[in-house]
């Protein structure tokens, strides 16, 4: 028998999924989905007597922010945020309609099911639960439902930090994506062991992102003499660009053992009997199954060429060719990465920097992590909260400019073979319905006691 809190969480998530709030990154093709979603959140909270402020810095780019007063005015406020925009979805690639919010065999399908309308709907349900039960959280809670995260947050979190920091007054910490989902902590049982015993002793790790990689973009620009394709010079802009791109593609940046990475390695090393030494790191990570790709991407800086541009006619040698680079950097690595990238491309190309957000770090020993552990333990007594480094970035990078320590933790208890992280931006994005119920219960406890 589910509770009203759990039922409302699922209902709100489904209704938000049904709003097409796709963020293409192109103002010409973005509709009013974010505004409609923010207005719906505002309406749901108003029904519970919770007021807030609707913000629309550009047509259709709506956000909503509300504050719930806590019982301890001296405690720093806690920001809890979720973005309302989603990435595009090609319906033909999906088994079920991406904006249908249909439930099949215990899974809720839809764009935003984990990224991240699941948390947005859950936050609304928790806030209404507090109002219904006359419950007061310990800290002030600032609930932010934001536009534009999927394109950098210019019209959402970034705009809020630049123009309305008053709405974040007193906030010291933040909770949002990407973390909280369960992954297998213990090693696979030995062949021939009792499946009942295995099920009884298997433990889950609930990853909390205490650090996020920085996200940056740059353009490689190679130049040469233009000419006719029948008279090649041998060192054209395209050839020079190709050499630079190949050098970057073949390069492996060195492993950096950040505190977040080391915290993960320590916890999984104890549980699985792995050493994770410099010599065994790659092999040890490979034993973690789908978790290995997530953690492997957090061990080093990465630079990935993603878009190539050259000439426009087959018989014309262009004077210029370029490549776009996706850069993900670890804390404190900005200067080192810039030097290493310049050395890699040498004289073949110029590196022209674009948007550049440095990595963010939050304390892994903060009292908030004890709250997360207690809330998980109340629902999953053997569950262990483990820090990790998110190899992507979230809106926490913007709030960090105000000194707000950001954590990624949307609690989802899932089966051991269900890769939550793989659902982000994927076709058939889905989440187990019982995981949403779990999320509602655990989030309610976290926000009440943090």
Image (cartoon, helix red, strand yellow):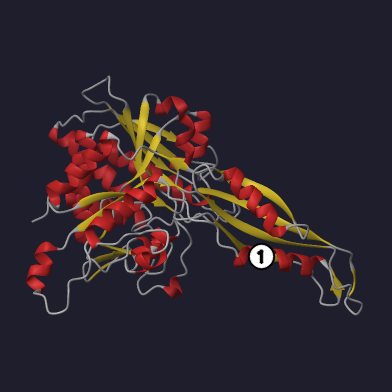
Residue at x-position 28% and y-position 28%: 140
- Pick the residue in front: 333 or 278: 278
Q: Which corner quadrant holds the C terminus? A: top left
Image position of 403 with respect to 20: above or below: above
Q: Residue furthest top?
A: 74
Residue 148 on image: x %, y %? 49, 47
Total count of labels: 1
Residue located 36% across and 60% down the image:
421
Answer above or below: position of 12 versus 372.
below
Residue 251 appears left or right of 224: left
Identify the residue position indicated by label 1 in the image.
247
Give the residue at x 26% y 69%.
417
Between 447 and 67, the one nearer to me in the picture: 447
Nearer to me, 369 or 317: 369
Q: Residue 444 in the image: x percent, y percent?
A: 20, 42
Would residue 307 be found to the left or right of residue 357 on screen? right
- Residue 413 in view: no
Quadrant of the frame with the N terminus: bottom left
Q: Can residue 33 be spotted in the picture?
A: yes
Q: Does 278 sit left or right of 77 as displayed?
A: right
Q: Where residue 329 sits in the image (x, y, percent)?
A: 53, 50
Q: Is residue 288 above or below residue 401?
A: below
Give the class, few, some or many, for how many residues have Cα within 10 Å of label 1's Cα (few <14, many ≥20): some
Query: At x 23% / y 43%, what residue is drawn?
Result: 372
Q: What is the secondary structure assignment of the residue under circle 1?
A: helix
Residue 308: image location, x then y, percent = 68, 66
């Amino acid at each position: 028998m589910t509770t009203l809190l759990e039922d409302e969480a699922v209902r709100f998530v489904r209704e938000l999924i049904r709003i097409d709030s796709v963020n293409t990154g192109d103002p010409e093709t973005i509709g009013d989905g974010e505004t409609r979603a923010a207005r719906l959140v505002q309406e749901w909270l108003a029904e519970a007597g919770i007021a807030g402020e609707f913000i629309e810095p550009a047509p259709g780019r709506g956000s909503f922010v509300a504050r719930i007063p806590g019982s301890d005015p001296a405690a720093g406020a806690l920001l809890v945020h979720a973005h309302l925009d989603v990435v595009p979805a090609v319906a033909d690639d999906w088994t079920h309609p991406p904006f249908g919010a249909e439930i099949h065999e215990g899974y809720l399908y839809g764009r935003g099911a984990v990224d991240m309308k699941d948390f947005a709907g859950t936050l609304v349900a928790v806030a209404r639960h507090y109002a219904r039960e006359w419950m007061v959280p310990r800290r002030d809670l600032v609930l932010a439902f934001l536009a534009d995260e999927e394109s950098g947050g210019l019209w959402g979190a970034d705009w809020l930090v630049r123009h309305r920091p008053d709405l974040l007054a007193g906030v010291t910490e933040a909770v949002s994506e990407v973390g909280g989902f369960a992954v297998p902590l213990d090693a696979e049982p030995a062949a021939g062991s009792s499946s009942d015993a295995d099920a009884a002793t298997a433990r889950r790790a609930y990853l909390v992102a205490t650090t996020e990689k920085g996200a940056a973009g740059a353009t490689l620009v190679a130049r040469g003499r233009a000419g006719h394709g029948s008279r090649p010079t041998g060192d054209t802009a395209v050839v020079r660009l190709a050499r630079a791109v190949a050098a970057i593609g073949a390069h492996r940046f060195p492993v950096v053992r950040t505190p977040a990475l080391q915290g993960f390695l320590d916890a999984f090393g104890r549980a699985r009997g792995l050493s994770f030494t410099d010599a065994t790191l790659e092999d040890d990570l490979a034993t973690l199954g789908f978790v290995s790709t997530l953690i492997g991407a957090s061990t080093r800086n990465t630079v990935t060429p993603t878009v190539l541009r050259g000439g426009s006619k087959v018989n014309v040698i262009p004077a210029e060719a370029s490549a776009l680079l996706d850069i993900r950097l670890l804390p404190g690595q900005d200067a080192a990465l810039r030097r290493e990238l310049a050395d890699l491309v040498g004289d073949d190309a110029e590196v022209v920097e674009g948007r550049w957000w440095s990595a963010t770090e939050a304390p892994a020993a903060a009292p908030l992590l004890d709250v997360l552990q207690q809330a998980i333990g109340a629902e999953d007594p053997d569950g262990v909260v483990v820090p990790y480094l998110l190899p992507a970035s979230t809106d926490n990078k913007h709030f960090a400019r105000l000194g707000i320590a950001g954590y990624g933790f949307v609690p989802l208890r899932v089966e051991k073979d269900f890769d939550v992280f793989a659902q982000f931006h994927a076709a058939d994005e889905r989440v187990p319905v019982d995981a949403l119920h779990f999320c509602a219960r655990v989030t309610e406890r976290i926000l009440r006691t943090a």
